[in-house]
Structures are given as C-alpha cells and as structure tokens.
Image (spheres, rainbow, N blue to C red):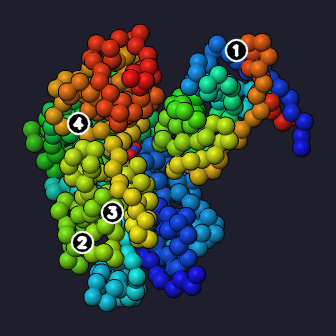
Amino acid sequence: MNEIEYHAAAKTDEIPEEDVKGVVLDDEEIAIYNIEGEYYATHGICTHENIALADGFVEGQLIECPLHSACFEIKTGKAVNPPAEIDLKTYPVKVEGDTIYVGIEK
Amino acid sequence: MNEDRTFLIIGASQAGGWVAQTLRHEGFEGKVILIGEEPYLPYERPPLSKAALLGEVTVDSTYFWSQETLDEANIETQLNTRVIAIDRNVKEIVTEGGTRMGYDKLAITTGARVRELPVEGADLPGVFYLRTMENTLAIRDAVKDGTTAMIVGGGWIGLECAATLTKLGCNAIVIESADRLCGRAVTPEISDWMLEFHTSHGVDVRLGTGIEKFQGAGQLERAVLPSGDTIECSVAVVGIGVIPNAELARDAGLEVDNGIVVDDRACTSDSDIVAAGDVTNHPNALLGRRIRLESYENAQNQGIIAGKAMLNKAEAYSELPWFWSDQFDANLQMIGLPKDWEETVTRGDKDSNEFVTFYLKDGVIDGAISVNNPRDLRIAKRLMLGKKQVTAAELINPETKMQGLLKR
Ligand SMILES: Cc1cc2nc3c(=O)[nH]c(=O)nc-3n(C[C@H](O)[C@H](O)[C@H](O)COP(=O)(O)OP(=O)(O)OC[C@H]3O[C@@H](n4cnc5c(N)ncnc54)[C@H](O)[C@@H]3O)c2cc1C
C-alpha cells in the first residue's frame, strides 16, 4: 500500500446535500459528494466516456453520468447500470472544521 | 448444467451486443453467436458524426467490448456475414454464402439503413450517407480544409455532420426541405434557436428547398436546386432518415409494421424469436402507444430485455424515450416523446445556449429538451415519472430549486 496524502479539496458549505462538486487534486479529477451530511469522493470522470461526473445528477446513493446516464454507487464506486461496466475509483475523505480533505495515494 | 442450446443473434451492433452480454450475465452457458454484416466488432454509432468524423478517436475505441472481453464471455462473432433468410420450420438461418446455421432461440437486431435520395447523380462519387464506420472513414478521407460540403437534411445527423465538418474547416451548407430544422423532433422555438446557433457558427442553412440533382464528370461537382440555382460542392452527405431492416423478419412471416412488431418483452409473434433496437415497433406503457425509436438507450435497454426474454426472465420494458445530440459546443438532450402538449416554457437563457424547454400537459411535464443542462433534464425525467404537478411560473423562475420540486 502506498502512503495516502490528504489534500484540502473544498469547503463543506460548497456542496449542499444530494449534490456534487468537481475538483482537481494532484492532477487527478475528483468528484466530491454530500449524502445526508456525509462527504464522499470518487474519480471525477465516467468510466464509459471522458466526461465530468460533477455535471451529473445525484439521487440518493447514486451519481448519474450527464452524458449517457450510466449510474455509479457513490460510496463504493460500483457501476450499477450500462453503458458503464467498470467501477469508479473511490478516495478516503475526512472533514476537519469546515474543510473537506480527500486522500490520494502518493 | 449441461447446456447444448445455440442462441443466434442477427446484427452485431449495439442491441445485438447487449443481447449477447445479457445472456452471459444471466448465466446462459450454451453457444452465443453474434452474426453481423459489417467488418467490425459492435461499435458505438454516436461518434460517427462526432468524434470519429473529427478524427479524434480510433476505430477500436468505439467498440463496446474488446475482442478479449467478448472472448472471456465466450461470445462468438461471425463478421462480414449477411443473413439472407430465416427458415422457421427447421429453425435455421441462411447466410449469403449459403451456410445454414441452426438455432434454439434467435434474436433479430438488424437495426436500420439509410433512406436513399432518389435524385439524378446521387450515385456520383462524393455523395455520401452516414450510418456506418465505413461511411465515416470515407467522408473523413474526402474532406479537407476549405471543402464545400452540401448536407442534405436538417435533422440530427445532418446538423451534427454540419457542425463537425465546420470544425474540420469545411464550408457546410445544410439543405432542408421543411421550413424549419429538426421539425419532427422539436418545437418551432427550438428550431429557431438551432437555426440561429448553426448560422452563428458559420453553417449556411437553407430551408424550404430540396435537391433537384447532383452533377459532375465522374465525381460530384455541383448540386442543382429546384429553383435552378447551383451550388459548387465536392462532397455531399445525405441524412434524410432511416428504414428499419425488417425484411428478413417479414419474409419469414413475422408480423412487421414500421419495424418488427414485438411485445413489451421484446418477443415477436414467434415464441423462439426476439427482436430489439432500431428495428422494433414496440409498445410503451408510459406513453400509451406503440413506437419505433432510433436511439442509443433503446438499443441498449431493449437489447438487455430481449436477452432476458430468450431465457424467459424478461420484465416488461417501458422507459421514457431519451436521446442526445452534440453540435458544436451544445449538448442537447430530450426526454419523452410529447405529441399533444398544451404549452411549452423555457427555463434559462437561450442566448447563452443554456436552457431547458418543458412541454406541459394537464399540469405535469410531458417532455423536455435541454441545451447544455443535462442535470435539469434528469430532474425533468423524475418529475415526469412521478407525475408531479408543476406550474409554468415556477419552472421559469430561476429562484426555483428544481431538485426541490421532486420532494412533492
Ligand atoms: C451517425 C449516428 C449518430 C448517432 N448519434 C446518436 C446520439 O447522439 N444519441 C442517440 O441516442 N443515438 C444516436 N444514434 C442512434 C444509435 O446509434 C442507434 O439507435 C443504434 O446504433 C441502434 O442500434 P441497433 O443495434 O438497433 O442497430 P444498428 O446499430 O443499426 O445495427 C444493426 C446491425 O445489423 C447489421 N445487419 C443488418 N441486416 C443484417 C443482415 N441481414 N445480416 C447480418 N447483419 C445485418 C447491420 O450491418 C448493423 O451492423 C446515432 C446513429 C448514427 C448512425
């Protein structure tokens, strides 16, 4: 296992409940979500085609791709319906004060 | 389980590919053979008028599944193979080469082919259609910076092609015989927006005229309009609609009516034969009528239902039709197939090319078209499925939180 480094990624008030925000950390595109007050992070690009999931739609535990409507489980990254068949990478998240930190392998 | 059945699929494209994959996902262990006329593994057609025509993606990257993925799933492919008959009495198909192959269950996913332009000179080199990878590669080879390209048909394919060829440096001229663009699919206001949008990007759009004939000495040189005007052009792309490839089914005695008639489980009038994708005429319970769709999502999701139906596991298929199109920097998406709406309202700003137009009927949304706003379109879909009451005033109001409407 590589060591994980936490990066300040967003402020908590930037991401309302059932919403998503895209950020770039360490050259990686990342999408950060708020589900019922808890924050989660996945890779920011759909595994089917090159499109930012931050333009997509959060519904319950799922993010739906804005282009071809593939859905992924936010907490696990699991691809739940086609056209995506490959899971999304997920990242550890921690919140300190009003800052959301996302952990990326060094 | 000792499974020795053979399931054949005619048409190795999106719908056929999903039939095959679904058979494996559902645990079918018999033979699965995808038979297709084209020389390629199943590939995505949307890029044909977009990234692939632009030259931004390779042929391989348009494949739904790589050869390894198909091998791992033990899905056999027989490409370059045209099926010419289905012999239902003995449950065999016949290929153009005369080979007979037996089936226990059969899926017909033969899609659609282009409607040809019945004018003089349409067979000249330089006149193209746009349906296959082969078409796209040929158009790309024929154009260069400064080429004048005549596009016949101002529907989705024509407009996407016009946008892409403009990006490649061509002078794109769109000829549309109706008095507005995409007339069968969108409201007059959206047609007006499209006209303005394409014109502002340098496309020369001519409405209300067809093509009289093409001329040239061994190669397209000009198009002659009914008015007698001529337009010098070395390339023409015709996009005037498609015809379902339903003749195989019809000749085999299956019910055909603007496509192969199937039920909500993708079953044809023969219990051993299913059909899916652009080739089917299917019922849609949400719309309360039969439809034939030419869409990515339908090819995928009806393909999945057809695969399950071959294993007698299908659930009823009924979804709100959804379609998208990319033209220049505009991503358009549509949900529903509104027919007799009462009013339309637009949220957002047409001039900034970011808006959603909602069709309203009986206080609920009956359909929507978005430009560069995929998120509100997805909310519209859920509002439609939930039959949520909404008013024109609240949809227009920028202060309204769309997601909030879902909580009603
Ligand atoms: C240029 C272009 C752009 C598009 N863009 C979009 C878009 O942006 N959004 C969207 O939602 N949809 C889009 N579509 C539509 C979408 O691609 C189609 O709805 C989808 O491909 C239909 O899949 P299908 O498998 O039903 O049929 P098809 O893709 O038509 O495949 C049918 C296959 O069957 C083969 N076949 C036919 N007859 C025989 C036979 N007798 N023997 C053997 N093989 C046979 C054909 O060669 C073909 O490979 C686009 C289509 C095109 C052409």
Q: What residue sits right under mark 3 in the picture?
A: B266
Q: Can you say whether B105 is above or below B295 in the image?
A: below
In the rendered image, residue B360, in percent from the top left (x then y), is placed at 23, 26
Instruction: Report how far apart the C-alphas of labels 3 and 1 lie in the structure.
Output: 49 Å
Give the CA distance from mark 2 to mark 1.
59 Å
Q: Tell me whether marks 4 and 2 sit on the same chain.
A: yes
For the residue pair B156 and B12, the one nearer the viewer reads as B12
Residues behind callouts 4 and 1 on a single chain: no
Dividing the image into four quarters, tell me where ligand 1 lies.
bottom left
The answer to whether residue B189 is seen in the rendering is no
In front of the other: B335 or B57? B335
Foreground mark, 4 or 2, reads: 2
Say which of marks 4 and 3 sits in front: 3
User: On the rendered image, what quadrant is the C terminus of chain B found in?
Assistant: top left
Residue beneath disc 4: B338
Residue B221 as seen in the image, left or right of residue B64: left
Q: Secondary structure at mark 4?
A: loop
The amino acid type, in three-letter code, at marker 1 is Lys
Q: Is residue A50 left or right of residue A89?
A: left
Count of picture labels? 4
Q: Residue at x 19, y 67 (%)?
A: B256
| Letter of the chain that mark 1 sits on in the rendering | A
Q: Which residue is mark 1?
A: A11
Looking at the rendered structure, whether the residues under marks 4 and 3 are on a common chain is answered as yes
Q: Which residue is mark 2?
A: B269
Task: Tell me how far mark 4 sits from mark 1, CA to CA.
Answer: 42 Å
Tags 4 and 3 touching, CB below 8 Å: no
Picture residue at 16% right of the left edge, 34% below the top: B340
Residue B113 shown left or right of residue B399 in the figure: left
Please give the chain letter of the residue carrying mark 2.
B
Instruction: Work out whether disc 2 and disc 3 sit on a shared chain.
Output: yes
Q: Helix, strand or loop at disc 2?
A: loop
